[in-house]
Image (cartoon, rainbow, N blue to C red):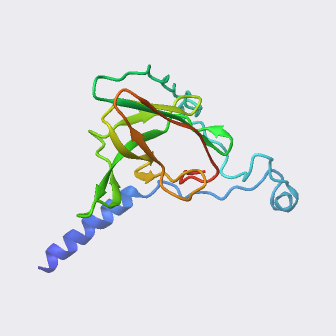
Amino acid sequence: MMRKFILVLLIGLFLLAGCSPAEPPQATQPAGGPAAAETEAYPASGYPYPPAIDTGYPAAQEAPAEEVAALPPLEMNPGTGAVEGQFIYRGEPLVGMNFYLASFITDADGNEYAASINPQKSPFAVSDSAGMVRFNNVPPGKYGVVLEVDVSSFLLMTPKGDVGLTVMVEDQKVADMGKLEYQDLPLNP
């Protein structure tokens, strides 16, 4: 039993020794020795050590701007309507954001108490470069407007924040929400 323990201990030490650097890292000093360390100014680019290392990989570049799809043409099949509007956040169009129309859940008395979306079935639209959204072929009914941000979805309030933003869709009609200007939305800065 003792031999097995010593064998396992030796193997462990051997593996640990193989993982350590061949030479211990050396402390670097600014050119000019220790006295220069007190007087040498840091470069404008920030903390000077460790110096930049050429890894052989290409330098980081900004990702190309994603193209934002244009607003789809107005389309209403028989028995459906459409919804459109423009979303502005702090004076700028809300570009490339996902929106859903949520169905309302009612209690036994018909009172609405929640809104629900099904990402596979709920009407969906993406805002264009002007912040415009258009939902085509929406079955008639009352819907809440939902903004999807990252992994969360939010039932939007009216820009004044007093009530939930709802829209009534009618057969072969366009429900125009108009220009909705927000100063506060649950967006990451």
Q: In terms of depth relative to the viewer, which is nearer, 148 or 102?
A: 102
At x 51%, y 27%, the residue is 68
Q: How many dots with numbers? A: 0
Judged left or right of residue 112, residue 29 is right
Judged left or right of residue 67, residue 37 is right
Outermost residue to the bottom: 2
Outermost residue to the right: 39
Q: In terms of depth relative to the viewer, which is nearer, 50 or 122?
A: 122
Outermost residue to the top: 73
Residue 16 place in picture, x, y as percent: 35, 62
Quarter of the image where one finds residue 10: bottom left
At x 41%, y 53%, the residue is 152
Judged left or right of residue 156, residue 43 is right
* Quadrant into which the N terminus falls: bottom left
Q: In terms of depth relative to the viewer, which is nearer, 41 or 114?
A: 114
Residue 174 place in picture, x, y as percent: 44, 30
Quarter of the image where one finds residue 114: bottom left
At x 75%, y 46%, the residue is 45
Residue 153 place in picture, x, y as percent: 41, 51
At x 85%, y 54%, the residue is 41
Residue 8 place in picture, x, y as percent: 21, 69
Quarter of the image where one finds residue 88: top right
